[in-house]
Image (spheres, rainbow, N blue to C red):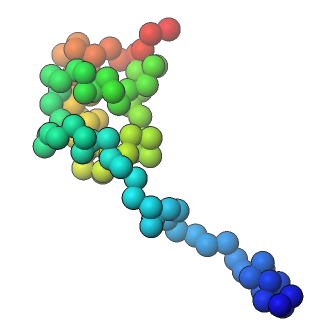
Amino acid sequence: MARQRDSAASAPPRRGRRGADRVRPRKYTRINSEAVDYKDLNLLRRFLSDKGKTRGRRVTGLSRKHQRQLSVAVKRAREIALLPYVGER
């Protein structure tokens, strides 16, 4: 018994995806929309922090494709002054 515990304790730490077996619910799938539109400001503001920065994929729970669409939509909305570049101070 003691040998088995020692060998398990001395094993190198596992690397790779953490929590890959756990499926995180996606916020984007609750929106039921195919593409992110730069004119939908309520949707875009949900994924921006108080400082005006776009939240990361780990925080938002979006897929890579939808996170990319979100970032492009935020950039377009900022360019035509629908969203501010910086948040409230």
Residue appearing at x 44%, y 46% in the figure: 58
Residue 45 vertical placement versus 57 (above, below): above
Q: Quadrant of the N terminus?
A: bottom right
Residue appearing at x 35%, y 17% in the figure: 85
Residue 10: percent from left, percent from top: 78, 80
Residue 75 vertical placement versus 17 (above, below): above
Q: Residue 78 lies in what quarter of the image?
A: top left
* Residue placed most toward the observer, 34 or 54: 34
Residue 62 vertical placement versus 54 (above, below): below
Residue 70 relative to residue 9: left or right: left
* Residue placed most toward the observer, 34 or 88: 34
Decide if residue 62 is in sight here: yes
Decide if residue 75 is in sight here: no
- The mark total stands at 0
Residue 52 vertical placement versus 34 (above, below): above
Residue 40: percent from left, percent from top: 18, 24
